[in-house]
Image (tube, helix red, strand yellow):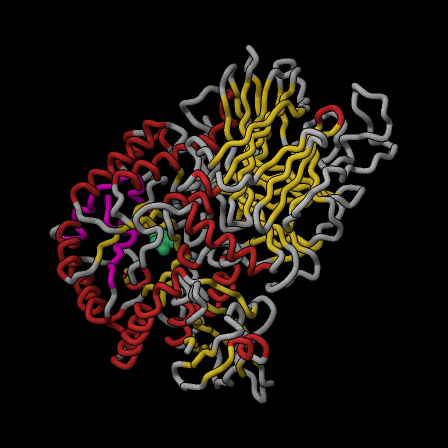
Amino acid sequence: MANQLITFDEATQSFHLKNNSISYVMSVEEGNVLSHIYFGKKINHYSGFFKYPRLDRGFSGNLPTSLDRTYSKDTLPQEFSGNNTGDYRVPAVIIKSESGARTTDFRYVSYEIINGKPSIKGLPHSYVIDENEAQTLIIKMEDATLNATIELSYTIYANRSVIARHTTINNNSTAAFDIEKLASLQVDLPKQNMEVISLPGAHVRERQIERQLVKHGVTQFESRRGSSSHFMNPFIALANPNTTEFQGDVIGFQLVYSGNHQFTLERDYQDQTRVVIGINEYNFDWQLKPQEVFETPEVLMVYSDKGLNGMSDTYAKLLRERVARGRYQYAERPIVINNWEATYFEFDEKKIQGILDQAAPLGVEMFVLDDGWFGHRDDDNSSLGDWFEHANKLKGGLRDIANRVHDKKMKFGLWFEPEMISEESQLYREHPDYALQVPNRGKTPSRNQYVLDFSRQEIVNNIFNQMTKILDAVDIDYIKWDMNRNMSEVYSMAYAAEQQGEISHRYILGLYDLMNRLTTRYPKILFEGCSGGGGRFDAGVLYYMPQSWTSDNTDAFARLKIQYGTSLAFPISSMTAHVSAVPNHQTGRSTSLKMRGDVAMSGVFGYELNLGEMEDGEKSEVVNQITFYKKYRQLLQYGDFTRLKSPFESNYTAWQFTSPEKDIAILFRYTGLAEAQAEFTTTQMANLNPEMIYENVTTGVAYGGDELMNIGLYDTLQKGDFTSEVTILKAK
Ligand code: GLA
């Protein structure tokens, strides 16, 4: 290891994780309680003497082993708090033992520092490709009464402002116990008046940025839907009130998990804020038998002193470079034509040939056959679970379609919804117990479908076998992996009563197992995640699939907020975005083809409309869009992304893509509603080299980098609603 990133000072019993940008400090206090000291900007030299002040506070009790009335777990900032032992704040771990006690108190025992980063079994996680790029501290904590140990794992990367944390518990006793809650992370931040930024949303309105003061009491951001969900993304950031996109402190927390999650904040009576993050304790109860181990998902903590853009840049690079994997991790992603909004369920080989004939000459690179090609699926009421070809829809079958697509020198993509079952299906007739259901109760339908019980290996295997049969027979280049409802009646017909609290998490383990087996077996296939649009847009899915359908809402104006919000925590290369027809099918709004193109190009680009209905003028505009995108695709998919003006704040949105060398930048500006006698506005760019001279490639005007960042450019006043402007600046 070139650099020692983690040190332990024996004298002061303190840990210091440090790289060029961040420091994380903890110490072992009296009674072996592990306290949190600091997470933030790098501290070159830490004395080891920043001790939490001692004071006898009323109604905050003391350690059972000490008569010191000035020392209490109820006030001390900590790294992993127990339950029912005098710390009244939200606990990180609750275990119900054989005796019925729900009492936990894990104390520090020892530590180990290892080079690199171990993997987490069965769960997605960030990784290293070289042992020297990170070090991992594993802190062992013990609850002697339970005879259980917890390992807190902290990885610090040498060159990223990231700490990756997760927790492992071992049952060393001779009796089973129930884990009712086990957080991936706890951290007690001794800061006042922090604001929390979260990404709530809904189907077709995903990841809308919300920012609020963290008030006294408990604030919770969670999903109980069995998936990470449209409704609350597994991400929050804690910022100072004066933190903006460009300056100020912020700490991001992102859970690498696709199931029920829980982000809890508690501002205590001393104005400290406890953060506890992990699998949601709702409907969770894991029976851990003697000698068994349970590992939690991982949380990626990011610190930035350069505002929200700084945090997002760290996340984008981390997720792109050390969470995403496979052949497409850095590959330029193909431009898609998807038939969904063009045909919905009504297609045959002639219609598809029509789409191909239209799309190929325009320069489109991949055709995706969406929902409706399997079982006897002619609408969304049947056939999920029957992954064999629809007998009457495509004469010649999928193979013929694949040939037709490949004849056009395009790639062929196919839609699947592997986790679902329709009652009207062969699979259901043969295996009604395959659906999640509670005995003697009705099942809640949603989109007239049910969720397969992926906690059972044989069900995962069944779907795997059905899918491989298709994938082995047909030359498929891409899969869109959909998931179109949330879970209810979470219960498995195959597990014992005392294990029913394990099913939601076991489902996710089964899901990851299937994703892992398919992505490993078919490395040449590009997988795209989807869940009614962006309902499972999370770092867990991204580990298997480098891109996801951002939203079923393809309206360009609505997409500004959705894509802006998504970019807070995810890289542009993970966000797919398509141009669709107007009036838009979700909002009824009409926007210009230019605006639709300029929004979709700020993501992984494609089309989702009937090209046959376009006029010649529009088609040549499409050719121009595709030519432009191909020329700048590397920059648009993998360049540095900076948010400049927020659609959540005004009528104007602006963002920018910049090459790593800062020699080329593309500025996108969008205006919502037009106004008469509108005021003149300017946009200041960012992330340029102040010393460089940049030429506007359209006008030939040369600007100083510092000029563009400080004076900026006037925005063009355009007539009509929903307009956009793209400016390319190249260093001379
Ligand atoms: C979901 C997806 C859509 C489409 C439909 C098909 O809603 O997000 O893009 O694939 O399912 O049923």
Q: Nearer the viewer, residue 438 or 629?
A: 629
Q: Which residues are magenta?
A: 365-394
Tell whether position 537 is magenta: no
Q: Quadrant of residue 240?
A: bottom right
* Towards the viewer: 525 or 38: 38
Residue 408 in the image, given as x and y percentages of width and height:
15, 62
Name, please, the residue furthest toward the top: 174
Q: Residue at (49%, 41%) from the top-left corner?
A: 2
Residue 333: % across, % down: 31, 58
Q: Residue at x 54, y 21 (%)?
A: 170
**Total numbered badges shown on the rendered structure:** 0
Task: Answer with left or right where residue 178 lies relative to residue 696.
Answer: right
**Quadrant of the rendered structure where residue 352 is?**
bottom left
Does the magenta-highlighted stretch encompass residue 386? yes
Left or right side of 134 for 638: left
Q: Is residue 540 above or below residue 557?
A: above
The reply to whether residue 602 is visible in this rendering is yes
